[in-house]
Amino acid sequence: MKPRRAVRRRTKRSVNRGGGKTFFVVSLLILIFAAAYYFIGDYIFPGEYVEPAAGEIIVSFLDVGQGDSILIRTVDHAVLIDGGEHRARNVVLDYLRNAGITRLDYVIATHPHSDHIGGLVTVLGRVDVGRVVMPDIMHNTVTFESFLEAIENNNIPVKFPVAGDRVQVGLIDLTVISPTADFSGSLNDASIVLRLNHGRTSFLFTGDAESAAELNMVNSGMVISSDVLNVGHHGSRTSTTQVFLDAVDPAVAVISLAANNRYGHPHREVMERLQYRGIQILRTDESGTIRMITNGERIYLY
């Protein structure tokens, strides 16, 4: 996608007929949905399913509230990166079911924090999974223990990647960019960072990688420039440093987070850096599940 620019939006032409009756029905539906959202929370609208065509990759940033979950799929294959908190598990499962996905070639857990692996515990037991990819790092929590038990109980092979490794199945070609060093003292910096490349288009998925990992990636010599950046750590000021943003040079930034979250994400400093560069910003707390499709030449937003 050169020259670099915001993703295009595919639209469907619609005709509004019915006058006052239509307005009344639409208004009533809006009130019902608003009430349901108020009482149930962030996890009721996983988003419309879009069918990929041959040669296309669809990337869906699922609305799992304060957490991350990304589904990458083609006609024949699917890869899931993270699964949000445990309470978001049904969002992920429903989205997979609506997409007709009964097998995940890879499930990638970027790091052991619960807002990334909590929902995966159930997924591993309900969906056929070819392999789990995770960092070689431990965490002393019930959620992480449950995650390891789910892997063992379902006899799923595990891969601990290093920078430069590739996770590839069909058109889906992911390069492991980080961790580039031993970040055993920082679970966030130990996050697996992946770059998806398809033709002339690219995506960078950063987990919760913070400034130390970002600097290592910049200095690694690996290609990290990408059209779409999955903003690190839900827009926290600990990530998306200026030097990293300069190196990635994205046209679009996607932030996965919950509305009015207790962390104050996204932080003002990060938003200002993105806005200063004129980067198109998409947020799951505002847009719900965000879906993009690439044919290798251009990226379209649904």
Image: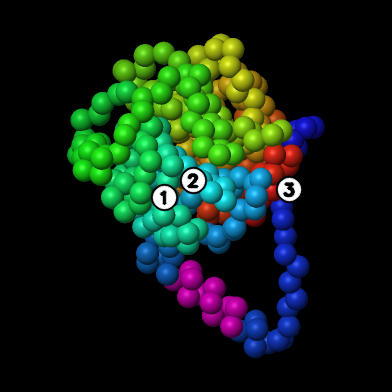
Q: Which residues are magenta?
A: 25-35
Q: Is residue 248 left or right of residue 85?
A: right
Task: Report if residue 169 is visible in the image.
Answer: yes
Q: CA distance from mark 3 to mark 1?
A: 30 Å
Q: Is residue 60 visible?
A: no
* Residue 218 image point, x, y percent: 57, 16
Q: Earlier in the sequence, mark 2 or mark 1?
A: 2
Give the residue at mark 1: 103
Q: Quadrant of residue 158?
A: top left
Q: Quadrant of residue 142?
A: top left
For marks 3 and 1, the one nearer the N-term is 3
- Residue 149: x percent and y percent? 21, 40
Query: Hey, what amino acid is under mark 3?
Result: Arg
Q: Nearer the viewer, residue 157 or 50?
A: 157
- Is the residue 239 above or below the residue 59 in the image? above
User: Picture coordinates of residue 58 (x, y %)?
Assistant: 59, 48
Q: Which mark is residue 78?
A: 2
Mark 3 lies on residue: 8
Q: Is residue 25 left or right of residue 7?
A: left
Q: Nearer the viewer, mark 3 or mark 2?
A: 2
Please give the name of the residue rendered at 55% of the width and 60% of the height, measured from the top-left corner.
49
**Type of amino acid at the residue the image marks with label 2:** Ala
The crowd level at tag 1 (other Cα within 10 Å; few <14, some 14-19, many 20+) is some
Image quarter in which the N terminus is found = top right
The residue shown at (57%, 47%) is 74
Classified by dominant secondary structure, the portion drawn in magenta counts as: helix
Residue 302: give x, y in percent of width and height. Answer: 64, 54
Residue in the image at 32% along x and 18% along y: 184
